[in-house]
Image (cartoon, rainbow, N blue to C red):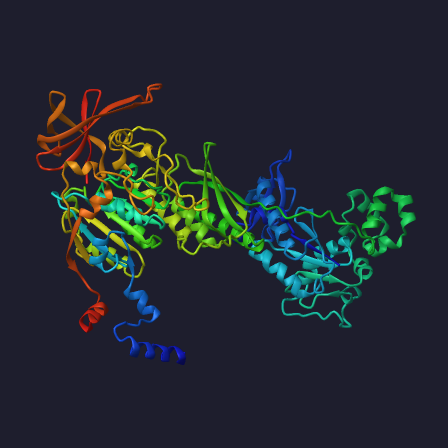
Amino acid sequence: MQKAIQLRQFLAERLPAVRLFSEAEAAKTSPCHPTGLPQIDELLGGGLPKGAITELVRDDKMTGSALVLCSILRHSQGQWAGLIDGRDSFDPASIDFKLSRLIWVRCQEAAQALKAADLLLRDGNLPLVILDLALNPLPQLRKTPSTVWYRLQRLIEPKSTALLVITPRPTVSSAKARLHLAGNFDFEALDQPQEELLRQLKFAIVNKRLHSDELEWAQAG
Amino acid sequence: MFAVIYIPDFALQAALRHEPELLKRPVALVDESLPKPVIVQLTETARAAGVCAGLTSTQAMARCRDIIIKPRSIAQENAAADALLQCGYLFSPYVEATAPGVCTLDLKGQTSGGDEKFGQQILTLLDQLQLKAQIGVAATPAVALHAARSASERGHSCPPEATIETDSPQANSADRNVRAPMRNALPFLCVNDASAFLNNLPIQSLQPSLALLNILDKWGIRTIGAFVALGKDALAERLGAEALELFQRASPHETRPLKLSNPPEVFEETFEFENEIESLEPLLFILRRFIEQIALRLTLASFAAEDVLLRLTLSEGSKYERPFKIPAPTANADVLFRVLYTHLENLRTEHPIKALYLRASPCRPSSEQFNLFDCTLRDPNHFYETLGRLTALLGPDRVGLPAIEPTYRPDAFRMDPLDFVGEQPLTRKTDSARSLSPRERAGVRGKSASKLHCGSDSSSTSNQCGLTLRRFRPPLPAQVELQGKHPCALRSMLFQGPIRRAAGPWRSSGQWWDKQLWQRDEWDVQTASGRLYRLYREHDNWFVEGVYD
């Protein structure tokens, strides 16, 4: 134990720019689920935050949310993931890899999707859950009380699950980070490689809440 | 040394194993397979009320108004016999299923086979299995059986607070040769001097025929000692072969080889409800006891359950059967119960339930070494339960793993259930063309082939081209105006207005050999709003299949 403390002191003196974390701190401060999309990962500091909700807003004029969804699933294909499809719109044929670890939950309404999300988040087995409400009508989403989103936030907090919610309008009041998708493709995009299309996508972060401890770090830094 | 585990009133105990509270009430067991169904076994309370074996149900009810009549159940007796044998196998590898409710163990090679602690362990285990047993230990199987049968009588003949020392001068000769320090507390008897023990046993212990018993009674022969004193030759000469057989059974040194049997790897329980049930609570009540019993038996045999089969017999004769796959085999009663409970919570049967049957398929607890980068579910059983809840919420075809059907029909997929055991590492699809749209397949064959396979072969990058389709299920009906052969205007609930650009038609068809024939023309269009849709025409009807996003 004494040697470990001496080693930490030695490293702190030699490398003052490098922060040294204990294991618990490291686990707490770097819980991210990489998406494989550099634009998102850079904005969110490594990927989708675990134990928190990230909202991806795709308004009516923008295109590319399904592309992002498939890209994240492709990047997470070695791990279990859950896709709660709020409007039963996911096309399995659009994926060119085997979906043997993707739990697809096909819902018809936003209320069903939220109940399914509640169950999956309570379970806590899946490291990534995507709640896709992009095609759900706005009245359905407006009917969802904000307490539902806070409940989901409370459910996910103690777990190491990352929840990504895709919505047509800013909806998730308890989201730790809200991203706006800026992508608008024309007819030629139908023949372009998906990699190139993904590179063209732009994201803007409009809201990022920091936990109190992270805020301290940010202020100290 | 041999030990015999004896379950008195075995058929009755087997019938009441899942309702042990009834043992304190007047209960009689009727064998309905007899030409004249009569009571064969009964509880002490029923006996105290004047009921005895051989009476009919009506006669018994005349003597005791509150008596509960239970039918004899061979299935329950088999389950109890399996449990007894599995319990015996824990204490010796040489086990014989001597008779229903009687199990003989060969204790050779065991140093502490005959002590009270040994008996206590067996009795505690059987008590958990809801079986009240008596144990006898002796040098021969026959004497051990006599000891087991008389263990309770000796034990309970004393007041509860009494402790009889086997060496005490007040004890009779038989008591001096048995080791039962707390006979009143423990139905366990270890016989050291078999001759002295047998001498004082009543002649009925040998179970002679009624005729022979009458003769012996007239002769004044009432103990085994007096019977043996008559001599083998004299008995054979006067009473024949039966007396000779009894003489051999009464011999303290006559031993026999055991007919060894392996404990069955069957873990099942069955129960017939006295009254048909219509609600979940009584079913869960019995089911919980079933699960606890099976889990205990699995644990004792170092097994875990990998499959559970639930069968409900309905009042009109039909059966509802449902197998449950346990994702992570376990013998934990809570986990097994939760799996069943989640399903039964949403089960509705058309008729009341008459009987319940549960069987667990055993397997060895898995000890799997995962790869360094292998990700697995933290609690597969809990996840299985969550999927059950999701299925109950959304429907059976709404939750699962998506799998593409081997056909070119658009949007042909199925939902596979999770296979936790046969989970394989991810591989790329072998026939990726199956998942492509007609437009993409045309690209594969045509000039766009080079574009289509533009990515690297890494599994983390996409080889596909174009935007991803979000489907409308079912497709939305639309009206399309054509200019020449090309769509120029669209009218649907999504959009009404001119079409700016269109590409197609991408023709596809299939299954012309059966009734599921399909044939369609696909168009990719961009509306004036800038949105990209996929349209298709089938039998002169237009539909919006999805939106590119």
User: Foreground residue, B14 or A210?
Assistant: A210
Could you tell me which quadrant the N terminus of chain B lies in? bottom right
Residue B533 visible, this angle: yes
Q: Is residue B184 above or below residue B365?
A: below
Q: Nearer the viewer, residue B232 or A58?
A: A58
- Residue B445 position in % (x across, y down): 29, 29
**Left of B335 or right of it: where is B35?**
right
| Residue B503 picture location, percent across and down | 17, 29
- Tell me if residue B317 comes above or below residue A126 in the rendering: above
Which quadrant does the C terminus of chain B fall into? top left
**At which x and y percent is residue B252?**
82, 56
Residue found at the very far top of the displayed protein: B513
Q: Is residue A192 left or right of residue B367?
A: left
> Looking at the image, which is closer to me, B383 or B111?
B383
Q: Image quadrant of residue B516?
A: top left
Q: Residue at x 39, y 48 (%)?
A: B384
Q: How many marks?
A: 0
Residue A9 appears left or right of B184: left
* Residue B129 position within the rendered picture, expressed as x and y whole percent measured from the top left: 56, 54
Q: Quadrant of residue B514?
A: top left
Q: Is residue B19 visible?
A: no
Q: Quadrant of residue B92?
A: bottom right
